[in-house]
Image: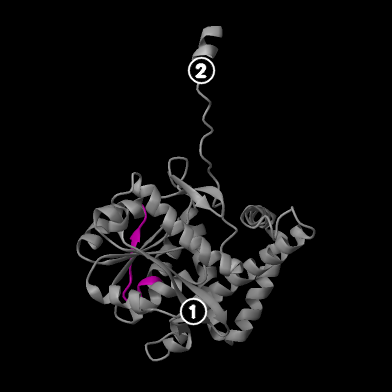
Amino acid sequence: MAKAGKPLVDFAIYAIVRLMVGIIQAIPYRAGLALADGLAALAYHLDKRHRMVAHENLAFAFPDTMGNHVPGGPKKRDVMVRATLRHFCRLVIEMIWLPRVFQVGSWKRHIDLGENPAPLIRLLLSGRPMLLATGHFGNWEMAGYMLGLLGFKTFAIARVLDNPYLENFLIQFRQRTGQTILAKKGDFDQIQNVLGAGGILATLADQDAGPKGQFVPFFNRPASTHKALALMAIEYNTPVVVVGLAKIAEPMRYRLEVEEILEPADFKNEPAAIAALTTRYTNALERMVARHPEQYFWLHRRWKHQPPIRKPKKSSRDLAAA
């Protein structure tokens, strides 16, 4: 049962967010970036819990360069944590400014298509269903926004926010160029229909899947990963395109990185096809993150769950002695 007064609290939070959005849109972009940097510094000092999560994650991911195994390791991690906070605070400013600066005639000022976009473009025009796999990396919101702006009908899987007013506001932003948002929980039939009709489906593929997820290596440590992406790819013969938009310059300049295109047919003879495909796309995400570590969301607990520790089976000698 919802708590009494919660709708009022939700609306008050929504009103504050809308006010802040209006203020940020009214000030110059450079001033917005300065505001973001100030908020990042404030978050670093006030949000100890997420700061420590980021330190722990970086120690696992880069033990030879940022971990405790080398002199000055914690200091290097601290620099990366600050850079990560700065990147994601700036990302919020960019999302607010996106409708103002990102138009059909201006998108090339903000997106570099990278070294070889041709395979992705061919797939986009082929009429085949396609799964776009990315992570909390770079500017994942801009990717869907761009595809919709260029006339591609895309669908993205997202978690529904607890605040209904903020959820509706965010949905309007995400769908303003033609992208359709599907709920991570509750829209599974529609997700299947998209792939069955040859649609383009985007998802964040780096979220912890709980104790029953598929455990695959991510920076040399088991990470619980959702099986659904690999299952859908194999069931619908859908290529998995691992992509990211990496920040390369200001103002708001990104490069498209098509890290790998995985065909499900390549895994049909694998004894554990789901695990193999999940491992491959996770490895591809890892390579992108390794090139731009400050642009990854180290603040979330990617390794929250670990494989259960299996007790060794007792030998017949042990049983006889018992």
Q: Residue at x 55, y 46 (%)?
A: 304
Q: Residue furthest right?
A: 71
Camera-nearest residue between 41 and 229: 229
Q: Residue furthest top?
A: 321
Does the magenta-highlighted stretch encompass residue 320?
A: no
Which of discs 1 and 2 lies nearer the camera? The answer is 2
Q: Position of residue 163 (x, y in %)?
A: 46, 58
Q: Which residue is mark 2?
A: 315
The amino acid on which the numbered mark 2 sits, given as a three-letter code, is: Ser
Gap between marks 1 and 2, in whole Å? 57 Å
Q: Position of residue 74 (x, y in %)?
A: 75, 58
Numbered range of the magenta stretch: 174-185
Q: Position of residue 8 (x, y in %)?
A: 49, 58
Q: Which residue is mark 1?
A: 255
Would you say residue 20 is visible in this rendering? no
Asked which secondary structure carries label 1, the reply is: strand
The amino acid on which the numbered mark 1 sits, given as a three-letter code, is: Arg
Camera-nearest residue between 80 and 106: 80
**Vertical arrangement, residue 280 with respect to residue 106, above or below:** above
Would you say residue 231 is visible in this rendering? yes
Q: Residue at x 50, y 79 (%)?
A: 254
Report the side of 167 relative to 89 (left or right).
left
Which disc, if any, is residue 49? none
Q: Which quarter of the picture shows residue 164?
A: bottom left
State which tag comes first along the sequence, 1 or 2: 1
